[in-house]
Image (cartoon, rainbow, N blue to C red):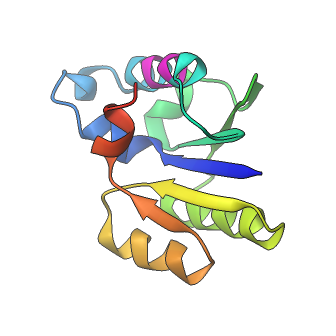
């Protein structure tokens, strides 16, 4: 099984489309794109934090599971990556955050940048 963990804030922030004016709306648009994207992963975990949580309810929609970070998104992303890796799943995290990249490598995941995902949406 393969799991793609998406740093929602980082991916949304990679687009200069006015997302900062409507963080919930930007999160909702990303969620909608993930639902229809032709990406070769069994499960996509979208991690949202702050105001963005207002755009998508926590829970599962088809193959996309949305998780609301209780505090900082990075800790939740690492926890989600660790949980999947401990089950023996292939885990890739989408983020441009170098410190987060190092942390997810430490739990057995690999990382790719937001451009990788945006090119597939």
The rendered magenta stretch, by its main secondary structure, is classed as helix
Name of the residue lying farthest toward the bottom: 106
Q: Measured along the vertical axis of the image, is residue 116 above or below residue 54? A: below
| Residue located 41% across and 17% down the image | 25
| Residue located 33% across and 53% down the image | 113
Q: Measured along the vertical axis of the image, is residue 16 above or below residue 111? A: above
| Residue located 30% across and 58% down the image | 96
* Magenta-drawn stretch contains 119: no
Q: Where is residue 22 in the image (x, y as percent from the top left)?
A: 32, 20
Q: Position of residue 31 (x, y in %)?
A: 53, 24
- Seen in the image, is 36 located left or right of residue 65? left
Q: Measured along the vertical axis of the image, is residue 11 above or below residue 61? A: below
What segment carries the magenta color? 29-33
Q: Position of residue 112 (x, y in %)?
A: 39, 57
Q: How many numbered discs?
A: 0
- From the viewer's side, name the closer residue of 64 and 91: 91
Q: Measured along the vertical axis of the image, is residue 56 above or below residue 52? A: above
Identify the image quadrant of the C terminus. Answer: top left
- Seen in the image, is 55 located left or right of residue 29? right
- Seen in the image, is 90 located left or right of residue 20? right
State the image quarter where residue 12 is shown: top left
- Seen in the image, is 2 located left or right of residue 98? right
State the image quarter where residue 91 is shown: bottom right
Name of the residue lying farthest toward the left: 16
| Residue located 42% across and 70% down the image | 100
Q: Position of residue 105 (x, y in %)?
A: 51, 77
- From the viewer's side, name the closer residue of 48 and 116: 116
């Amino acid at each position: 099984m393969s799991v793609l963990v998406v740093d929602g804030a980082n991916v949304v922030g990679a687009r200069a489309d006015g997302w900062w004016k409507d963080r919930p709306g930007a999160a909702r648009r990303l969620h909608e794109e993930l639902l229809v994207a032709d990406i070769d992963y069994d499960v996509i975990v979208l991690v949202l934090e702050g105001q963005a949580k207002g755009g998508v309810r926590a829970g599962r929609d088809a193959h996309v599971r949305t998780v609301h970070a209780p505090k900082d998104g990075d800790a939740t992303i690492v926890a989600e990556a660790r949980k999947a890796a401990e089950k023996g799943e292939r885990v890739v995290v989408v983020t441009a955050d170098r410190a987060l990249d190092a942390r997810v490598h430490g739990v057995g995941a690999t990382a790719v940048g937001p451009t990788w995902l945006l090119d597939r949406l």
